């Protein structure tokens, strides 16, 4: 889940892995452009929390608006809408 959603300047994404797996957690804008790669790589089992601070991969603040968070492993994929306020 995303917390808080809508969020003021930051969003936290929490997830759990039951076994070691490659994970990709990325953020897209409403036009489908990649904004930020939050996590990419193989991770061991456990609970995780990743915070997005409202900046893109180049360190620039993004505008308020609707974004999409995509979480993907080989066994699971989910896309969730996020709203960022400034």
Image: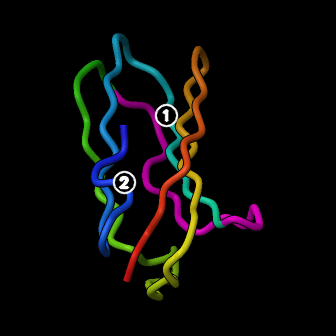
14 to the left or right of 57: left
Q: Quadrant of residue 42?
A: top left
Report the front residue among 22 and 12: 12
The overriding secondary structure of the stretch rendered in magenta is strand
At a point 57% along the width and 19% down the height, the residue shown is 76
Answer whether residue 35 is magenta in the image: yes
Q: Quadrant of residue 11?
A: bottom left
Report the front residue among 53 and 45: 53
At a point 53% along the width and 37% down the height, the residue shown is 71
- Rendered position, 76 above or below 43: above
The range drawn in magenta is 30-43
- Mark 2 or 1: in front is 2
Q: Where is residue 22 in the image (x, y as percent from the top left)?
A: 50, 29
Count the numbered circles shown: 2
The residue wearing badge 1 is 23
Q: Earlier in the sequence, mark 2 or mark 1?
A: 2
The residue wearing badge 2 is 5
At a point 52% along the width and 84% down the height, the residue shown is 63
At a point 32% along the width and 71% down the height, the residue shown is 53
Q: Where is residue 34 in the image (x, y as percent from the top left)?
A: 66, 64
- Rendered position, 48 above or below 46: below
Is label 1 in a helix, a strand or a loop?
A: strand
Report the front residue among 66 and 28: 66
- Rendered position, 86 above or below 19: below
């Amino acid at each position: 889940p995303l917390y808080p959603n809508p969020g003021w300047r930051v969003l936290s994404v929490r997830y759990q892995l039951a076994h070691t797996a490659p994970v990709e957690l990325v953020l897209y804008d409403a036009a489908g452009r990649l904004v930020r790669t939050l996590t990419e790589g193989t991770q061991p089992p456990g609970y995780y929390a990743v915070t997005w601070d409202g900046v893109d991969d180049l360190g620039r603040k993004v505008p308020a608006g609707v974004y999409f968070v995509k979480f993907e492993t080989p066994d699971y994929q989910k896309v969730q809408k996020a709203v960022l306020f400034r």
